[in-house]
Image (cartoon, rainbow, N blue to C red):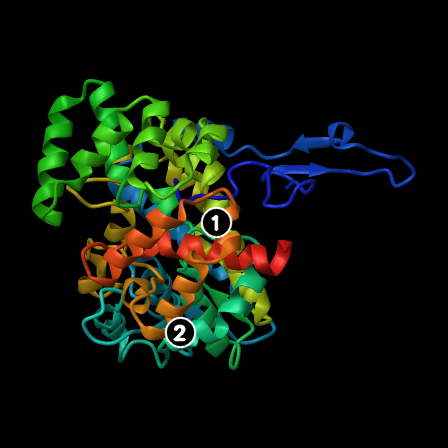
Amino acid sequence: VFNRTDQTEQTFSYGIYKLQHGCCMTLDLSKAYTKETLPVRKWYDLASHVQNLKPEIINLKPEQAQERYMDLFRKAIELRLRSDVPWGVCLSGGIDSSAITATLIREMKKPDVNSYSAVYRKGSWADESEFIKEFEGIVPHMHYVHPDAEGMLAHLDDYVRIQGEPTPTNSPFALYCVLEEASKDVKVILDGQGSDEALAGYEYIPGLYYKTLFTHLKWGRLAKEIVQYAKLHKSWRHVKYMAFFLLPSRMRTKVRVMQRGYIDPEFVAKHKDSVIADKLYGANAMTEMLVAHFEYKLEHLTKWGDRDTMAFGVEGRSPFLDKDLVEYSIALKDELKIKGGYTKFILREVMKGIMPEKVRLRVDKRGFSVPMDEWYRTEGFQKLVKEILESESFARRGYFKPEEAKKLYERHLRGEVNVAKDIWKWINLEMWFRTYID
């Protein structure tokens, strides 16, 4: 319903639990333990570290805040270059990976950079080649992969096996393809993971931010930000997000369930209460909201990336997830994260003169996306999707209503709707069951 996994200790396998982030345990191997008696303790808490840092930086002038951010960012990259083997960077065309790449070359004077990118046919919504090509003449060694529907079908079984658990999105497949190519040259790769969570980069976060301005009676600033966002993005979706986040927790869940009419109501009845609807979408301040993203959202992204990189014997490193940089970013004033319709405001400011302007000022967000809406209309995927939707095993799982799913898929094939994310869940969950459970 919420496109999230890994927000609790639960896994997709009965009897297997995850040690939560910031926790550790020391075991005495001469003793027997039950789950309840395991000596788990929390050694790190992000929220308290952010809170302790706030008094120190709350009165920084914008120029001072930017200077300190850039210093921490450079140190975070430098730390992740420690290696006895060749390294490279993932370059998606987005502001995060571009910031790392540009800083390496123009600020840290690293002349011999290898970048790796996924590009698609011209005109595809997922293709970011126009932004990636801004680095031609800057990055000395640019490598490209061209994922397609046939390639994904050929690698699908391997991909499901590598991930080990269902994923609510297929975007890790683009990274899978990039890493297959990168592993020929490098053993360490830097990526842009973590910036969106620390600096309010997701497209729905302005809606959450506007909710906090509304509830804190900062209506003048709210009106100004809403108008500036609308002018910049040519959209009012941020207002819809704000309305959604103002709903009570149960209502937020209900609205999302209603959008997905193919989900079995009995399954929904068993899982009415959602940590995501309550904690992640129920935050009342920017700091609380971003900490919640680290507590209840980020983990699944780092897990997928880790499984992709390890599948090819490559170590993934994320400068934006540097402990000091994360704590500082979240503790910053709200207007250094969202301002004038822009998200990740401070990062855009410190990248002036370092990153190509076309990338620095872009407002759309795609990341390592895959044009699955197009791919699901190809002959090969039509055969796979229909086989799954019509299978007896899919019907008896108890998660989906097959007839509703079939109708939705037919509408997708006719181009009436784009339900690629939903189609992925149907085939991914079923293939995972067949691989790991059946």
Can the viewer see residue 284? no
- Count every numbered label the image shows and give the total: 2
Location of the C terminus (image quadrant): bottom right
Of the numbered discs in the image, which one, if any, rests on residue 116?
2
Q: Is residue 320 left or right of residue 11?
A: left
- Quarter location, residue 235: top left
Spatial CA distance of label 2 from label 1 is 41 Å
Q: Position of residue 430 (x, y in %)?
A: 50, 55
Task: Where is residue 131? Give x, y as percent.
Answer: 23, 68
Task: Give SS at disc 1.
Answer: helix
Q: Nearer the viewer, residue 387 or 209?
A: 387
Question: Which x, y percent locates residue 31?
Answer: 89, 35
Left or right placement of residue 313 versus residue 408 in this view: right
Q: What residue appears at the point 39 percent right and 34 percent down from the top-left corner? A: 331
Residue farthest along the right direction in this orientation: 30
Q: Which residue is mark 1?
A: 395
Q: Position of residue 251 (x, y in %)?
A: 32, 25
